[in-house]
Amino acid sequence: MIVSALVTSVAINLGLCILFFTLYSVLRKQPSNFDVYVPRLLADGKLKKTSHFHLERLLPTPGWVKRAWQLSEEELLSSSGLDAVVFMRLIIFSLRVFSVAGIIGVFVLLPVNCTGDQLQEIDFVNLTNNSLDVFSISNLNNGSKRLWIHFSAVYIVTIFVCYLLYYEYKYISAKRVAYFYSSKPQAHQFTILVRSIPVSIGSSVSESVDSFFKEYYPSTYLSHVVVHRTNKLRDLILDAQKLYKRLLPLANRTKSGQRLSVMGKKLELLLCPSTLGLANLSQLEIWFPFLKSILTITFVSEVITGYLPSLILQLFLKLVPPIMKFFSSIQGYISNSEIEKSACNKVLWNIPAKLAVVVPAQASFFIAYVVTSGWTSTSTELFRIIPLICCLITKPFTQRTDDEFEVPSLPYHRDIPRVLFFGLLGITYFFLAPLILPFLLVYFCLAYIIYRNQFINVYAPNNETGGKFWPIVHNSMIFSLVLMHAIAVGIFTLKKLPLAPTIIFPLPILTLLFNEYCRKRFLPIFIAFSAESLIKKDREDSNDATMAEFFDNLATAYQDPALLPIQYSANPDSRRTPLLSSIV
């Protein structure tokens, strides 16, 4: 890829970012779009829809950026939970790492790479026609003494990243314990799940469980709930609710010339593209000879090599998180938090580990990928284009009330692996192709502002793991460091730098020893709280006057929602009588 193709990709994505920011600043002020852009404020009663028109609604304003910037960590913790704090600490951690790596890479390594001439001498007069490879370590001559600068940079960044990892692990561990002490009693803290219960002859499952726990755990046993698989029943009730909501807006008006229809299942065809091949024009000419004349057009070739491959890869990778979440659900995990944590692990280790194999050979492609997937996808997160389109399509045909309004939650299993993958690319490439670092810094700056805004206005916590995502973050960063060390050994060997591979070889060993130390010191806190913490919490709860009411509600906390009566708005109109008033 040449510089002009990268500039074209940057220009396209920068234009899209500015467009999304401008449209968001205008559309978020329209009352009809409050369900999309400020659903959390609506649900909390902090914002009401008004029909008064103001000219200010049509003018884009950056006030939301200031509010997102001023959000403190304590406010985020109290409103969105510890998982949101962990997610933002991941972005802050990445900003710190790549600020230091960016200074070293852009102001030290990049000029050094440009002084080499192994590939070609850089043409400063016609800079846009230079290959991006001239800015990488590949342009330095074999055996050059300047390679020791890259060697030193690997050591400096490794030490700095390990220091930050230790600091963050210690900080979040303390936050997790403090969050546990300050949190109100939760039903899951007093509940265990028992499966595969043997049924005695002449007694039911419920009677067997009750007699067993009363006999062996009389002081701690309160009650039990037998949970059955009610998937079919739940689907029937949801269908009844959907039919009721469809008919409700039509109850007081007459329609003619229209008919009700049921949408059938949609079969999607998934195309798995060879995106790396698209980055090579000669390969495209072999695959599609009839495009040879079109590919000679400068702008077309720049768009195809600089923008299209990373866009296709981005669209393909969007399908991975929901698939991994489905695999985790059928794997046997029960709670939503465990499913998301397992899916996060699957997305992280199955996708980047395979892509890491081709990372060293595809520097220019992944630079364009950071711009396309990083900048544009983060701006799309702010603009919420899919929810906006769905809202515009369904709003004329539905009539939702405040009781039926649902606030979304941030899918951590999708966004945490994405951020970690960009961290993998940055740590791997900072000494190979330091040109990627400024684009990564822009991405993390966008993510910092946009996700803070989304936590304020859009996302509400649906379930809470208590910060259990951080060990995944820590392990991913250790993997990135070890991968960088392995690549460095190979690069310095190929570049015939004497002693460098031997001296750098202890670095991954020391990194793994550091990881083992952190694992033994901090990981037990994320698996289970210590007996000291639990006893202290129990003593505090014993003095709480609301615990009696909590225990009264605990017996029905896990009753199957499918077996609860359906709640409808009170209306004497017989045409709105629900099809299923209750389930016995």
Image (cartoon, rainbow, N blue to C red):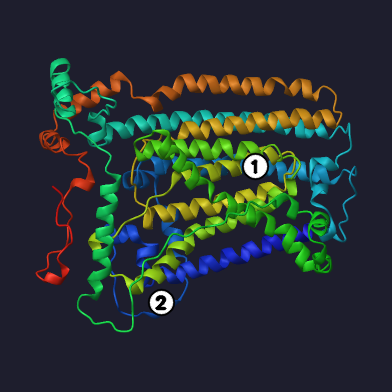
Q: Nearer the viewer, mark 2 or mark 1?
A: 1
* Residue 374 in sight in this render: no
| Amino acid on which disc 2 is placed | Glu
| Amino acid on which disc 1 is placed | Leu
Using residue 5 as the reference point, say whether residue 339 is left or right of it: left
Q: Which residue is labeled 1 in the image? A: 425
Point out residue 2 in the picture as x, y percentages from the top left corner: 80, 56
Query: Which structural element holds mark 2?
Result: helix
For the residues marked 2 and 1, what is the alpha-carbon distance in whole angstroms?
42 Å
Point out residue 235 in the picture as x, y percentages from the top left corner: 29, 52
Q: Residue at x 81, y 60 (%)?
A: 128
Q: Residue at x 51, y 69 (%)?
A: 22
Front one among 484 and 558: 558
Which label sits on residue 56?
2
Tell me which corner region of the image, top left, top right, bottom left or bottom right, holds residue 403. bottom left
Work out which residue is located at the far bottom of the displayed protein and give it.
256
Front one among 193 and 418: 193
Tell me which corner region of the image, top left, top right, bottom left or bottom right, holds residue 429. top right
Quadrant of the image containing the N terminus? bottom right
